[in-house]
Image: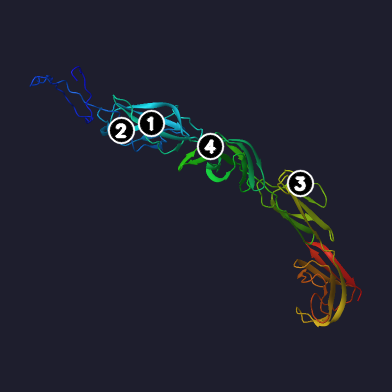
Amino acid sequence: DGGATSYVWQGLTNGVAYSFRVQAYNSAPEPSDFSPASATQTPAGPPFQVTGVAAARDQSIPGNVQIQVTWDQHETQSNGAAISQYLVQAYSNGTAYGQPQTVSGATSTRATFGAGSLPAGTGVTLSFSVQAVNDVGPSPASAQSNGVRDATTPAAPQITAVSEGDGFADITMQAGSANGARAEEIQYQVLVGGTQQGTVSATGGRIPLANRANPYNISVRAVSQVQGITYTSGASNVVQAAPFGPIGAPTASARAGVDNVEVSWSAPAANGRPVSMQIRINGGAFENVPNNGSRSEPANRGQQITIEVRASTGLPDGNGHGAQTTTASASARTANPSISLSRGEEVQSPENQNVAPTFVVSWNDMPTGVQFMYQCFDADGPIRAERQPHTFGSANGTSPRNQYTFCISERGGPYSITFYYGGNEYVSASSSN
């Protein structure tokens, strides 16, 4: 066209430098000389679409949602003009969130979204797209990355109440913010003395514990697991509990002697609270005593001694803790013996070989297993000068009529025999023949 002053050259390769010369034609046989070459020009377009966009949670800052977005190396996909920057757009549940983040440099392949740039702790799913930018403009947006939940470390719960049971403690608590985790992704771990021991619900629950007087230190922490990553809160406030249960019955015993009754007692095992003991004798006043002990109570012949034992924690019965006061009792009666004396057949004395009727003694309710001293008498006084020992093997009985047991006497009566205990006369009997 004779009036043309410009021309658009199609089919050039972006990124290749071109220069141009112009030659004019008219009706003359020869055209004009070519003009000098123009300055070089390089055709270009927007960068090609970014590929390989991925997102991953970064836990390097505890308590913050921080996400690293990466993409494939892309500087060679500039389409004729060098890439100057990348635009990284966040999406919340598929909708663009906030302004794109600008990352300078053609070789950049990473962007970090940290505190303040994301909807932290709301539980939404975040994804990202990337555009490369050169002098011509931005590339088409990349495909969105994989989704990343914006969860972070849950807040610590707060224990608001604790109560003690028999073998357990119940706590009531207020859960802290889930910070993006769903209810089914959080568990509340119980810490007893700092060691994890079971779980409770978001409002509290029952903690099995052995009964003891020394209180346990109890706290709770929230642990969430979101997309394979575990977040653990700090521990809640610490509360104390010392579970306790019913106590068993104490033991009581009474054993009769000749002139006393030996009483003894022992406390039941503690079941979370200290146990103290009291006793009383024959309905008297209760007195404080050690948890285990015994003593001798003086008693007359035939007197019954009763010990009542009371064990107590000092707390009321019931309220889920069972009996806190228990009792036991025992009784024993001292013997109230009687004896009679008669003359048996003639037998030979083992001491002097004399032959004379033997003393036959019948007894009832005599203490057994106890050594007595005895002495026999006739009309002339003691048959033997020294008292002799004797232990009854049964509470009731009669000595043999044809065997030497206690004494014989060749002299006339009346006859008598006396048994002594502790140096004092205990029981005696006499016979006129």
Q: Secondary structure at mark 4?
A: loop
Q: On the image, numbered disc 3 is attached to which residue?
A: 287
Q: On the image, numbered disc 4 is attached to which residue?
A: 235
Give, as a three-letter code, the residue at label 3.
Glu
For the C terminus, give its image quadrant.
bottom right
Give, as a three-letter code, the residue at label 1.
Thr
Q: Which mark is residue 112?
A: 1
**3 vs 4, front mark:** 4
Q: Is residue 142 above or below residue 278?
A: above
**1 vs 3, front mark:** 1
* Label 3 Cα neighbours within 10 Å, binned few <14 / some 14-19 / many ≥20: few
For the residues marked 1 and 3, what is the alpha-carbon distance in whole angstroms? Answer: 78 Å
**2 vs 1, front mark:** 2
Between residues 337 and 34, which one lies in front from this camera angle?
A: 34
For the residues marked 4 and 2, what is the alpha-carbon distance in whole angstroms? Answer: 51 Å
Q: On the image, numbered disc 2 is attached to which residue?
A: 48
Q: Secondary structure at mark 1?
A: strand
* Label 4 Cα neighbours within 10 Å, binned few <14 / some 14-19 / many ≥20: some
Give, as a three-letter code, the residue at label 4.
Ala
Between residues 429 and 178, which one lies in front from this camera angle?
A: 178
Percent position (x, y) of residue 131?
35, 30
